[in-house]
Image: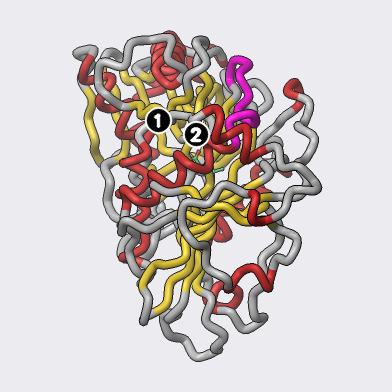
Amino acid sequence: MGQTIAFHKADQLKAKPDASGLGFGKHFTDYMFEMDYSLDEGWHDPRIVPYGPITLDPAATIFHYGQEVFEGLKAYRTEDKRILLFRPDKNMERMNQSCARLNIPEIDEEFVIKAIKKLVAIEEAWIPSQPGQSLYIRPFIIGTDSALGVHPSATYKLLIILSPVGSYFGNSMSPVKIYVEDEYVRAVKGGVGYAKTAGNYAASLKAQTKSEEMGFDQVLWLDGVEHKYIEEVGSMNIFFKFDDEVWTPALNGSILPGVTRASVIEMLQHWGVTVKEKKISVNKLFKKAEKQKLKEVFGTGTAAVISPVGFLKWEDHVIKVANGKTGKLSQKLYDTLTGIQTGKIEDKLGWTQEVKVDHEEATEKVQPKAEEAPEAVKTEDKPKEAKAEEKPKEKKAVVTD
Ligand code: COI
């Protein structure tokens, strides 16, 4: 794509939130990335602009037919102050798989990784550094055509927003209580289950609410046809440790191919642990638990990394897993993955990518002087004029790749 990323400077920066109470996805940084697609121009006009509302026609495709894909990845601050991304290439690869399924034009994966790195570098002061904290990166694409006919949009917007986060669940490693959902399903084979798209999450909300009302944290999803086979847990992939083997549901078209899922499988294999990707019935799970073969259960996802399951309920059957405590393998996986992500453990598998910050450039960009004239802003290319009308208060500079 080789395009230049314009930088539109904000007049004012926000106060940073208190690092001790970040929660998940509640605070957003000063800037976001934006890029448009049209049939004539393809993906064009990449720019980093002040974070804020976007204007869309009420008839936009996204509002009516949900043509959307998204991703979630994180930037971590290491003890020696470097910034690491965890497997961004995998997220971009999956984003394109989701785009293909949702009939959205594919992105240039390398270019979007560049855009992520540039945005994160500009926002480096927002990366929290306490244990369990990171800067969550949410790239997403929406269909923007104003038309009510059910057709793929001809225009799109790609946005990337950033949120400093703590752990997804209050205490990330305290085991969660799971209810096996036997009424609602998340996705079916042939549908969009393997794509990271908004509709899958909308479809999960009713069951999530039901499980919370019943005193559980999340649901265990079964397949949409026979309601027999285990697919995911909440918005995560799921793993079971049966004696010395680890099993996880095989990807079948309705399960999301998680980046953390893939990393856990690779890490376990690297440790010499037998991992089986197979069809696992809920009946078999409860039978194995009865025979004392079920040692650990854990969910995997970008937000929580590893989330141990301490309690499972299916119809009248209940299982207390690992005495309701965090199992040794779950803990080891959490420590290893977060260790690699934060640079404490050597990244032997080459999963992390460093974000380089040009400190002079970043400081100049994030501390605009109120009285600064636009022509005083460092400019290496002539910025496009179109967006200036929409956001008159911004001053523009250009960041080249
Ligand atoms: C993840 O953890 O991978 C997720 O997708 C969770 C996110 C939807 C909050």
What residue is rendered at 24% in x and 35% in y? Answer: 277
* Foreground of the two, 202 or 267: 267
Residue 141 seen in the current view = no
> Is residue 398 rendered to the left or right of residue 189?
right
Query: Relative to residue 199, is residue 279 depicted above or below?
Result: above
* Foreground of the two, 381 or 94: 381
In reply to whether residue 381 is colored magenta, the answer given is: no
What residue would you read off at disc 2? Answer: 74
Q: Secondary structure at mark 1?
A: strand
- The reply to whether the C-beta atoms of the residues labelled 1 and 2 are less than 8 Å apart is yes
Range of residues picked out in magenta: 123-132
Determine which quarter of the picture holds residue 84.
Answer: top left
Q: Amino acid at mark 1?
A: Phe
Q: CA distance from mark 1 to mark 2?
A: 7 Å
Q: Residues within 10 Å of mark 1 (few under 14, many from 20)?
A: many
Q: Amino acid at mark 2?
A: Lys
Query: Relative to residue 203, is residue 117 depicted above or below?
Result: above
